[in-house]
Each structure stands twice: as C-alpha cells, then as structure tokens.
Image (tube, grey):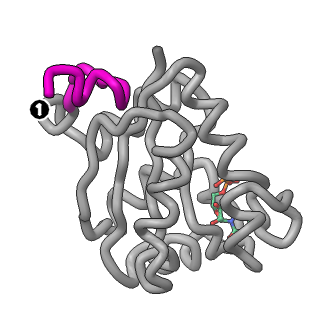
Amino acid sequence: MERTLVILKPCTIQRGLIGEIIARFEKKGLILEGMKMTWLTDEILSEHYAHLKERSFFQRVKDAMAVCPVIVCCWKGVDAVNVVRTLAGATNGRNAAPGTIRGDYSMSVQENIVHASDSQETAAIELKRFFSEDELFNYETKNLLSLYAND
Ligand code: UDP
C-alpha cells in the first residue's frame, strides 16, 4: 500500500470543480486518508516547489497557488503514486490525454487542476509537509454489500 499527496489547486476551487475531481480519485478506488482546506504561504510553497527555483516561472507558480485556499488530500492504494500521476495526466493541460484529469479540465500549464507527488520518496516528504500524523486516518473500508449485510 502506498500513500500519495494530491493538492486541488486554486483554479479547481475557483472553478467549482472540487467535488468532480475528488470523485475521480474515489471512483478509481483510492482510499481517502486525510483532507483539509488550507491557505499556502510563500514559505511552504518555496519548499514545495524548490525543484523549480531556478526557473523563470517560479514566483508565478507560487503566486498562483496562493490566490485562494487549496485542498490537500492523502490518497491510499496499491501503487497509489503512479495511479494518481496517471489519472492526473501530463503537466501541460493542452497536451494531457483526454480521460486524464488535466486532459479533461485544463487548457493551461500552470492552472492544471492538481498537484500529485511524483515518487514514493517525494510523497512521504510532501505528506509530512502538509499533514500531521493525527490528521491521517487509517480505517477499514467496506464493500457495498457488507454495508447493509446486517439489515
Ligand atoms: N509549471 C508551469 N510552467 C512550466 C512547468 C511547470 O507553470 O513550464 C507549473 C505547473 O503548475 C506544474 C508545477 O509548475 O504543475 C510543477 O511543475 P512540475 O514540473 O513539478 O510538474 P507536475 O509534477 O505538477 O506535473
């Protein structure tokens, strides 16, 4: 089992797509272990996007992530990191394949709906960055039949 971090970016909140995007991950069969709304500071964004600090668009990317609160989620599942990256699609929404989240909802490189951890190592670091352990919930999931088996 793996855990991975997803951030619903400000464009997603502002376009009213929160439910639709969360539904994509839920329907796929990933398990939601934690979720919260939070306003990202320049300090945390500098850490999160440190791999882009030499790029010309570094400040623009950080600013775009701070125009309104974001929603951070922890999803769990077998191969969750790769599964979520595949669901998210290519970074540039204009190149992302139809059927992927970015391919279906984005016409932009920057405003590309979600952030998704790119490796297990990154996921562990990013989850620590945004969640304390007591904000992540490990619980049993039941299939539909077992939910009403005792009726
Ligand atoms: N980004 C951008 N212009 C670029 C490359 C990246 O605005 O040319 C933004 C985009 O929002 C992307 C984020 O920076 O999601 C992080 O870039 P990364 O290369 O880590 O892509 P990701 O892992 O998000 O697909």
Question: What is the x, y in percent for residue 137?
Answer: 20, 30
| Local SS, label 1 | helix
* Residue 113 or residue 29, whichever sits in front: 29
**Which quarter shows the C terminus?**
top left
Q: Which residue is the site of mark 1?
A: 134
Which region shows up in magenta? 137-151
* Residue 57 or residue 71, whichever sits in front: 71
- In the image, residue 60 sits, relative to residue 122, either above or below, namely below
Q: How many marks?
A: 1
Residue at position x 24%, y 29% from top?
147
Question: What is the x, y in percent for residue 17?
Answer: 48, 74
Residue at position x 50%, y 66% from top?
20
For the residue carrying disc 1, how many other residues have a C-alpha within 10 Å: few (<14), some (14-19), or many (20+)?
A: few
Residue at position x 56%, y 47% from top?
116
Question: What is the x, y in percent for residue 83?
Answer: 64, 33
Q: Residue reaching furthest front?
A: 151
Residue 138 on the magenta span:
yes
The residue carrying mark 1 has its beta carbon less than 8 Å from ligand 1: no
- In the image, residue 151 sits, relative to residue 19, either above or below, namely above
* Residue 148 or residue 29, whichever sits in front: 148
Residue at position x 60%, y 58% from top?
53
Q: Is residue 40 left or right of residue 15?
A: left
Residue 19 on the magenta span:
no
**Quadrant of residue 79 within the rendered picture:** top right
What residue type is disc 1 on? Asp
Ligand 1 shows up in the quarter that is bottom right
Q: In this view, does 127 lie to the left or right of 56?
A: left
Q: Residue reaching furthest top?
A: 1
Q: Main secondary structure of the magenta part?
A: loop
Question: What is the x, y in percent for residue 100?
Answer: 73, 55
